Amino acid sequence: GAVEALCLYGNDIDDTINPVEANLTWTIGGPKSRRRTEQGFNGADKFLTPEGKLKKTTKKRVGLTGFKAPARQGAELYLGEEQIGHVTSGTFSPCLKKPIAMGYVAKELAKEGTEIQVKIRNKMQTAVVTKMPFVETSYYKAA
């Protein structure tokens, strides 16, 4: 699931992460959808306004590339000296022939192309916030 940027429960998502932070808002429909307006599911009030709009968040799940060694779950993410997040999952991608990872950073650092650092085996390496999925998927999409 890493190349497709699919979330693994317990790693990339858990009961402390909401769909907005995880970039999974497609699972709750568009702004005027029944799911958003009726909010008939657990936790809706935590990330939706009464009108069904998304509440502001402080962090976002991002894709990461640009480092030499695979960044594993728990690896710390930095901007200069400040720790700004952590890796939730990472691997070497045979398709892309390079290491990839997902993690959470402050929302203002989640823009594609943002350079940060990842601490791998006690060494700092440059990482770049990357668009997900890492490889375009060909999943069936109903019309």
Image: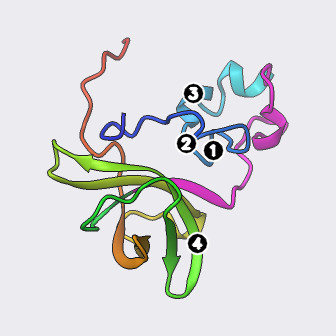
| Snapshot quadrant of residue 125 | bottom left
Point out the stretch of residues depicted in magenta.
39-63
What is the quadrant of residue 24 in the picture?
top right
Q: Distance between the residues labelled 3 and 4?
A: 27 Å
The earlier-in-sequence mark between 3 and 4 is 3
| Real-space Cα separation, disc 4 to disc 2, in angstroms | 18 Å
Q: Which amino acid does label 1 sit on?
A: Val
Labelled disc at residue 20? 1
Looking at numbered disc 4 in the image, what kind of residue is underneath it?
Answer: Ile
Residue 29 visible to the viewer? no
Return the x and y of residue 81 as percentages of the image width and height.
Answer: 54, 87
The answer to whether the residue labelled 1 contacts the one labelled 2, judged by CB atoms less than 8 Å apart, is no
Q: Specify few, some or many for label 3: CA neighbours under 10 Å numbering under 14, 14-19, or 20 or more.
A: few
The residue under the point 24% across, 67% down is: 68
**Marks 1 and 3: CB-CB under 8 Å?**
no
Which residue does the numbered mark 3 point to in the structure image? 27
Residue type pointed to by label 2: Asn
- Check whether the beta carbons of the residues at disc 2 and disc 3 lie within 8 A of each other: no
Q: Which amino acid does label 3 sit on?
A: Thr
Residue extending furthest toward the bottom:
81
The Cα atoms of the two marked residues, 4 and 1, are separated by: 18 Å
Where does the image place residue 25, in percent across and percent down from the top left?
Answer: 58, 36
**At 35% from the left edge and 68% from the top edge, which residue is drawn?**
128
Quadrant the N terminus occupies: top left
Using the numbered discs, state the Cα–Cα distance from disc 1 to disc 3 in whole angstroms: 10 Å
Of marks 4 and 2, which one's residue comes earlier in the chain?
2
Q: Pick whichever, 120 or 56, lies toward us.
A: 120
Depth check: give the residue in front, 10 or 134: 10
Q: What residue sits right under mark 2 in the picture? A: 11
Which dot, 1 or 2, sits closer to the camera? 2
